[in-house]
């Protein structure tokens, strides 16, 4: 691919040994959560595959996903950008701007037709003919469709691209949708998270760089290796959950002792992400470790699952907020009272019926 | 007269389009237009939501200045509900604010702005040995030996130093060569590398800066470790109304914050100080001096006429913002407006901008004359507490709704509103903060805190290096970039200062991080309103909330990039981007690098600006 | 008493009856443990180490274990119910939504329960009860699929997760699934309150052996029930004079 080298090629150019190359392959195998038996495949992938061309588009987003991408430690963002992929178009990092930049994109799309990887960060605004999100004087939705046409595969970077994101929360004034709602007929992989963990982002790219294909996905189209488990099932606070030891309020004794945040609304029990095992900054921390529950930032529609600090959403009832259990108790109590009253009336009715039966022999008529 | 369009403007955050009317013969920009071309409607999205959740929504206004909108929102809600956060929470938030400033600025310079000044192509001509020597010279000449108070300084020696060897620069140069020879430039593709401005600097400076571009790309992640420790992640760390969720205990390894965690924060702050002192500040000053010496002192625009700030870094907790208490506790009192700084300190005029002022609709308001919104009453600007966000897209001047040629400078043309101080536009940002603090101290309006003293010392030190007075070099494109670097150094020490404060307070036995007295909405008044102020990386930021029956009845954000990149007002008076473009000379009409350099010196964040 | 001239109708198979009582037990268990799971509190001495706290005392782990055990018992008992459905006509007393008669009878029962009519037509199972059981089975179905959708995802690559996992997508996301599971649990309890009352009331009002029918399988009715056709088929093997012994 136009002088593009494989990873092994790059090692040779730099005069690095085969041994160090194999060592890198081993690390990569580890990072990707692959079994050691996969090593030969990793090696041959790294020897042969040319660097994939990546086009990175921005829709309705906050650039938090780019920021996360460059925070990656293993692999380092510089290694990804210079040695693993060829990032030919990115609003955030590319040197060029304006017309020459758009022209370059057209060239890339032609030259690498069917071969480039399309990374999309952000949701797709479809309201008012897409005019809530214009790029280069055209609606982003149009640019996206055009770029998707020749793409080998599409990466939905972050919860905005994968689900619509914060702007798609109610009432979704710009009518923003996920990328896969407007793009089809391509392998599409979701990398949700707001933002996703840096190493998850680069991990997917790295998988593609090495194996020339997208990593195995779950039923929702997320890479299994990173989104296979609920945070709750990998959380270091799980023993406290099991023991029934919960922080009841922020900054109480339970919070200081690092007890489970379930009662402060933690969404770990419903959220699929690597925060519990991989964590952020290669194991340094994650929201729960810092004392705040997970808000479910990699889940579909999590924004509208507010209020974030209750396990059961509040139900507004005449100026106050209550919840399902209170309402259940009230309605249950009312039901008990109701049946008791009904019972009393029934007793009355029966005695009336009895006295009636004496006159009206033959029992009740149909 | 030629009309030149640049869309998209890249190496910024979000979707920005600029158009200029250029006199090709003289290179003079006659008129300029700046347009934010995307709107997400987050002010509408957070309406009717629980005020305790809103920080998380509005935090997603921006992932670059992450945390800023969250903290502003928390401050607004706490102001409305009368919540005073604990001391530790105040220190922790200040550490998170300052380390965010450092990170944002450093990444802006090396990864967003640098390629306007230096080119990898030009770096190929450099002599690696001379570059190594240059590195030593730069460190010698441009390091500013200034520091803040550092009571707990366990850093045995500076850990982050630039390499100054021939071998290092040769390796980097070889890598660039390989990329260029392959003909596949990746992110370096399609730029106007042949623009004459890339000849202002010698090849060695290009190589040095490109090497640091790569080096800092690998190192920047360590600057925001405090976010990961205190907030669990970055971007978008977690917070709570009433303080911080990261409970402190010195008895428990399971505690979110204990000695080990604090040590990690300390190591990060130390590394940050070193990175700023030995890379960022010297690099910027080295480049800046060469530019200023060659007469590049344009791009000032509105900075010369009017700059505005709100002030930040409350030293201690405060009982409210709208009641004026916040302003009494600040370490960085850049609250106020300075007019005519471009004419020198003597002619400069300082105007107070008190809490009372900002809550006054006659002082602070936003207009939509040239914005794609409609207001209830045409032509009447609205104070953010009464603010309204109702989209009204009208299309371009030439072209179609979905295929623009030129936008219409005489009608609506941007998704940004136009924020105004007493009916006038103003520039905000590091440059504004530096001008305001410098003016206030020099005019004796305030007795400087250590932070403010450092600001003045920095400005004076740089004026000496450049041997021109502040009013000449500060309100320019170079000055805006330099002020940001100086502020980064300042913020690194602010992190350290609040880290020390946090330790001392914990040592005194206070481990409290959250005030949950008013956590329950039942304790709230039926109706309340509040304002949250911060000095975000790009300038003065304010969030405004009206709470009714436990929900947000109205929510408005007035954002730094909105101040700077706004469309003109009803009188045709320009915002800072437009004014700076008009104040910039263009050498090659269809390669307006100077315009982009000037605009990028603001560190544009369009997701922020339109939200 | 007046029972003298009533007839005995064999309605419920033992499979249904066993299922019913297993269901009663498991639903009560599921509901109480479920509520605990939804809003847990600490039971036992408060130590800082979960290992000490959990030993021998009620805890989230144990509550969840009981909940899941009950859920399995509950689910498995449906097999009995299904078997009864196949074997015995009386286990098939479904509402005849498609018949006009059904709605007329429904109105009749409704008027009785609102005390407008002193009695309703005699039935083996009145149309309102029939509808309410369908509603309950629907709710129970929701509980099972939402419950297993949450439960099986502990092992996302298991076959259980492959079957139930898609429920999470179908209903939006797993948080929504947990909400639905919780709300429907309350609806089931509301059903149970009314249902137990209705059974007791029917016994009291008409002495037709309502409650005991869930033990014995037979009901006693003085008049021929209008829905006799649902069990007899003309052969009449399930209708006996009450003096005869009970079979089945
Ligand atoms: C076979 C069926 C059922 C299964 C597999 C099942 C499973 C589950 C699971 C996995 C949970 C979440 C536990 C956790 O968060 O760790 C749960 C919670 C709960 N279950 Fe069930 N359940 C079933 C049936 C029922 C029934 C029939 C009821 C009630 C009548 C019930 C009531 C509850 C309640 C109230 C909760 C708490 C909901 C919450 O707030 O999370 N469950 N159940
Ligand atoms: C002490 C408590 C209970 C008693 C005495 C009782 C009694 C009865 C009786 C007599 C019937 C037959 C009604 C008829 O067809 O005429 C019945 C059916 C039924 N009961 Fe209960 N019940 C009790 C508790 C419950 C509970 C807690 C539930 C579930 C929440 C339940 C669910 C059902 C269902 C689903 C049927 C219909 C059976 C079928 O046709 O599959 N029962 N019960
Ligand atoms: N403008 C802006 Fe921000 C900043 N700094 C926020 O308030 O960048 Ni995204
Ligand atoms: S997913 Fe989150 S972090 Fe990424 S662009 Fe969207 S809002 Fe920003
Ligand atoms: S903190 Fe959250 S994820 Fe962790 S165990 Fe508790 S509920 Fe589960
Ligand atoms: S909020 Fe997001 S970062 Fe992880 S812990 Fe929850 S998925
Ligand atoms: Mg606004």
Image: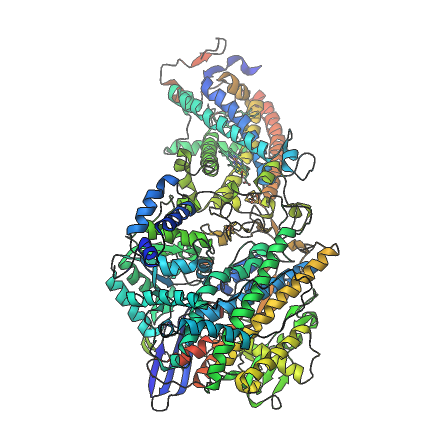
Does residue A226 lie above or below C25 as drawn? Answer: below
The image shows residue C119 at horizontal and vertical percentages of: 52, 28
| Residue C93 at least partly seen | yes
**Identity of the residue furthest to the right in this view:** B508
Is residue C88 or residue A69 the one in the foreground? A69
Is residue B182 or residue C103 the one in the foreground? B182
Is residue B311 or residue C102 the one in the foreground? B311
Is residue C72 or residue B603 the one in the foreground? B603
| Residue B257 at least partly seen | no
Picture residue at 41% right of the left edge, 32% below the top: C102
Does residue A347 lie above or below B502 as drawn? Answer: above
Picture residue at 32% right of the left edge, 44% below the top: A41
**Identity of the residue furthest to the top in this view:** C244
> Along the horizontal axis of the image, is A77 left or right of B263?
left
The image shows residue B173 at horizontal and vertical percentages of: 38, 68
Give the quarter of the image for residue C43. Answer: top right
């Amino acid at each position: 691919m136009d002088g593009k080298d494989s990873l092994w090629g790059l090692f040779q150019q730099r005069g690095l040994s085969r041994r160090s190359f194999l060592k890198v392959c081993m690390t990569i195998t580890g990072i990707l959560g692959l079994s050691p038996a996969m090593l030969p495949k990793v090696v041959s992938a790294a020897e042969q595959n040319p660097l994939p061309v990546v086009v990175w588009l921005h829709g309705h987003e906050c650039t938090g996903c780019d920021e996360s991408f460059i925070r990656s430690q293993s692999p380092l963002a510089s290694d990804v950008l210079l040695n693993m992929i060829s990032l030919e178009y990115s609003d955030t990092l590319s040197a060029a701007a304006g017309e020459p930049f758009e022209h370059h994109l057209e060239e890339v799309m032609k030259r690498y037709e069917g071969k480039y990887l399309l990374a999309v960060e952000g949701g797709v605004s479809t309201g008012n003919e897409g005019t809530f999100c214009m790029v280069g004087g055209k609606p982003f939705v149009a640019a996206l469709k055009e770029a998707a046409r020749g793409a080998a595969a599409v990466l939905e970077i972050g919860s905005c691209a994968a689900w619509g994101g914060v702007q798609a929360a109610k009432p979704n004034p710009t009518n923003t949708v996920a990328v896969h709602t407007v793009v089809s007929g391509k392998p599409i992989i979701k990398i949700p998270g707001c933002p996703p963990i840096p190493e998850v982002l680069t991990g997917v790219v790295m998988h593609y760089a090495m194996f020339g294909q997208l990593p195995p996905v779950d039923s929702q189209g997320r890479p299994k290796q990173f989104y296979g488990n609920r945070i709750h099932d990998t959380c270091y606070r799980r023993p406290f959950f099991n023991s029934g030891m919960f922080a009841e309020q922020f900054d109480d004794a339970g919070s200081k002792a690092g007890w489970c945040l379930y009662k402060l609304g933690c969404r770990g029990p419903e959220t699929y992400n690597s925060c519990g095992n991989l964590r952020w900054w290669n194991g340094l921390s994650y929201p729960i470790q810092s004392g705040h529950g997970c808000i479910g930032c990699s889940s579909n529609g999590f924004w509208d699952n507010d209020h974030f600090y209750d396990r059961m959403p509040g139900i507004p009832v005449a100026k106050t907020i209550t919840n399902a259990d209170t309402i259940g108790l009230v309605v249950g109590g009312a039901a008990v009272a109701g049946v008791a009253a009904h019972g009393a009336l029934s007793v009355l009715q029966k005695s009336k019926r009895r006295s009636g039966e004496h006159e009206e022999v033959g029992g009740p008529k149909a | 007269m030629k009309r030149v369009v640049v869309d998209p403007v890249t190496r910024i955050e979000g979707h920005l389009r600029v158009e200029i009317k250029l006199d090709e013969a003289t290179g003079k920009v006659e008129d300029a237009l700046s347009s934010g071309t995307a709107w997400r409607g987050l002010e509408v999205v957070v309406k009717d939501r629980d005020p305790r959740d809103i920080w998380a929504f509005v935090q997603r206004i921006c992932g670059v200045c992450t945390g800023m909108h969250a903290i502003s929102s928390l401050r607004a809600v706490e102001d409305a509900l009368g919540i005073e956060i604990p001391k530790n929470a105040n220190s922790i938030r200040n550490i998170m604010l300052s380390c965010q400033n450092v990170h944002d600025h450093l990444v802006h310079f090396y990864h967003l702005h640098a390629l306007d000044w230096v080119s990898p192509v030009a770096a190929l001509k450099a002599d690696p040995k001379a570059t190594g020597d240059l590195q030593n010279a730069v460190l010698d000449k441009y390091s500013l030996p200034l520091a803040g108070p550092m009571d707990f300084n366990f850093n045995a020696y500076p850990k982050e130093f630039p390499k100054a060897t021939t071998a290092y620069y040769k390796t980097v140069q070889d890598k660039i060569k390989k990329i260029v020879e392959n003909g596949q430039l990746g992110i370096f593709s399609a730029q106007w590398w042949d623009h004459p401005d890339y000849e202002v600097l010698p090849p060695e400076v290009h190589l040095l800066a490109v090497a640091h571009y790569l080096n800092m790309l690998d190192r920047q992640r360590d600057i925001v470790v405090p976010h990961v420790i205190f907030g669990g992640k970055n971007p978008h760390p977690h917070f709570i109304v009433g303080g911080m969720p990261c409970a402190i205990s010195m008895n428990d390894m399971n505690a979110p914050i204990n000695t080990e965690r604090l040590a990690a924060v300390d190591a990060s702050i130390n590394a940050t100080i070193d990175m700023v002192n030995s890379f960022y500040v010297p690099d910027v000053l080295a480049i800046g001096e060469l530019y200023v010496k060659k007469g590049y002192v344009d791009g000032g625009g509105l900075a010369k006429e009017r700059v505005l700030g709100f002030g930040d870094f409350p030293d201690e907790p405060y009982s409210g913002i709208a009641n004026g208490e916040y302003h009494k506790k600040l370490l960085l009192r850049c609250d106020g407006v300075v007019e005519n700084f471009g004419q020198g300190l003597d002619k400069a005029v300082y105007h107070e901008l008190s809490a009372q002022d900002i809550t006054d609709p006659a002082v602070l308001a936003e207009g939509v004359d040239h914005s794609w919104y409609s207001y209830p009453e045409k032509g009447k600007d609205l104070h953010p507490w009464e603010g309204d966000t109702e989209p009204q897209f009208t299309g371009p001047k030439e072209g179609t709704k979905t295929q623009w040629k030129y936008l219409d400078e005489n009608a609506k043309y941007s998704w940004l509103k136009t924020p105004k101080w007493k009916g006038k536009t103003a520039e905000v940002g590091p440059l504004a903060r530096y001008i305001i603090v410098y003016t206030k101290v020099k005019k004796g309006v305030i007795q400087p805190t250590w932070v403010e003293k450092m600001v003045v010392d920095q400005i004076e030190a740089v004026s000496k290096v450049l041997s021109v007075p502040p009013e000449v070099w500060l309100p320019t494109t170079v000055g805006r970039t330099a002020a940001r670097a100086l502020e980064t150094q300042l913020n690194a020490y602010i992190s350290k200062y609040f880290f020390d404060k946090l330790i001392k307070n914990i040592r005194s036995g206070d481990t409290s991080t959250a005030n949950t007295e008013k956590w329950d909405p039942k304790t709230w008044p039926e109706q309340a309103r509040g304002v949250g102020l911060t000095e975000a990386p790009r300038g003065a930021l304010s969030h405004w909330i009206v709470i009714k029956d436990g929900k947000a009845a109205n929510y408005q954000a007035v954002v730094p990039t909105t101040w700077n990149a706004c469309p003109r007002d009803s009188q045709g008076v320009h915002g800072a981007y437009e004014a700076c473009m008009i104040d910039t000379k263009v050498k090659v009409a269809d390669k307006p690098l100077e315009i982009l350099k000037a605009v990028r010196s603001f560190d544009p964040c369009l997701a922020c600006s339109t939200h | 008493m007046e029972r003298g001239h009533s007839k005995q109708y064999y309605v419920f198979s033992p499979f249904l009856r066993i299922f019913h009582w297993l269901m009663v037990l498991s639903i009560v268990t599921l509901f109480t443990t479920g509520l605990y799971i939804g809003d847990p509190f600490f039971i036992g001495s408060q130590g800082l180490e979960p290992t000490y706290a959990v030993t021998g005392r009620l805890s989230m782990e144990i509550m969840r274990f009981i909940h899941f055990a009950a859920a399995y018992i509950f689910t498995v008992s449906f097999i009995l119910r299904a078997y009864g459905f196949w074997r015995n006509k009386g286990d098939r007393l479904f509402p005849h939504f498609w018949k006009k008669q059904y709605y007329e009878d429904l109105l009749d029962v409704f008027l009785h329960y609102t005390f407008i009519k002193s009695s309703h037509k005699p039935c083996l199972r009145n149309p309102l009860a029939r509808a309410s059981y369908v509603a309950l089975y629907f709710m129970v179905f929701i509980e099972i699929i939402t419950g297993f959708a949450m439960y099986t995802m502990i092992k996302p690559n298991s076959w259980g997760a492959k079957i139930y996992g898609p429920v999470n997508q179908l209903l939006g996301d797993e948080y929504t699934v947990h909400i639905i599971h919780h709300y429907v649990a309350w609806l089931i309890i509301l059903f149970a309150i009314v249902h137990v009352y209705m059974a007791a009331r029917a016994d009291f009002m008409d002495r037709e052996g309502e409650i005991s029918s869930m033990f014995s399988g037979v009901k006693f009715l003085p008049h021929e029930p209008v829905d006799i056709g649902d069990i007899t088929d003309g052969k009449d093997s399930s209708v006996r004079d009450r003096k005869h012994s009970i079979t089945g």
